[in-house]
Amino acid sequence: MKQTEIENIQVFVWSAIDVENKECLAIWVSKGRSSFETYVFLRKVLKYCKNRPEFVVDKGPWYPWAFKVLRLRYRHETFGSRNAVEGFFSKLKKG
């Protein structure tokens, strides 16, 4: 998720990237960054998943509640697999 401004309005861009094939599964823009927005986004992502995958996230405090409610596995990773997400956002910034 990245924070940006559109016409002086702060928004957050959420993305779900398949770390194995670098495919973008979902992208969503919200005005907030909370456990509720995380929950809504994860519900959208799950529509594109055949099973209940393990998610790789950064250290945002908004993740634990949503993953617990949805009974999804996740792990925190600053680098490694998260580089797929960071690579996606760097392409988004260039466009």
Image (cartoon, helix red, strand yellow):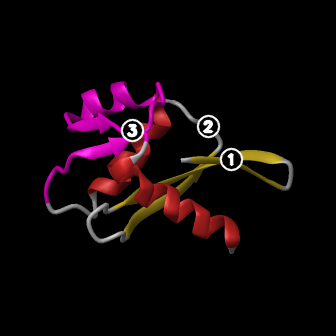
Labels 2 and 3: the sequence-earlier one:
2
Does dot 1 land on a helix, a strand or a loop? strand
Q: Which residue is mark 1?
A: 11
- Could you tell me which residue is drawn at 52 percent across and 30 percent down? 34
Find residue 9 and report its horizontal and vertical position in percent.
80, 47
How far apart are the alpha carbons under marks 3 and 1?
17 Å
- Could you tell me which residue is drawn at 47 percent across and 24 percent down? 61
Image height of 21 relative to 13, above or below = below
Find residue 47 and report its horizontal and vertical position in percent.
28, 60
Relative to 67, 27 lies left or right = right
Labels 2 and 1: the sequence-earlier one:
1
The residue carrying pointer 3 sits among few (fewer than 14), some (14 to 19) or many (20 or more) residues within 10 Å by Cα, namely: many
Identify the amino acid type marked 1: Val
How far apart are the alpha carbons under marks 2 and 1?
7 Å
The stretch of residues the image draws in magenta is 51-78
Labels 3 and 1: the sequence-earlier one:
1
Q: Which residue is mark 2?
A: 32
In magenta stretch: residue 95: no
Relative to 89, 67 lies left or right = left
- Could you tell me which residue is drawn at 35 percent across and 25 percent down? 65
Find residue 83 and report its horizontal and vertical position in percent.
43, 55
Q: How many marks?
A: 3
Does dot 2 land on a helix, a strand or a loop? loop
Relative to 46, 16 lies left or right = right
Q: Which residue is mark 3?
A: 39
- Could you tell me which residue is drawn at 36 percent across and 71 percent down? 23
Identify the amino acid type marked 2: Gly
Image height of 20 relative to 6, above or below = below
Q: Please name whichever residue, 26 or 44, is drawn nearer the observer in this view of the structure.
A: 26
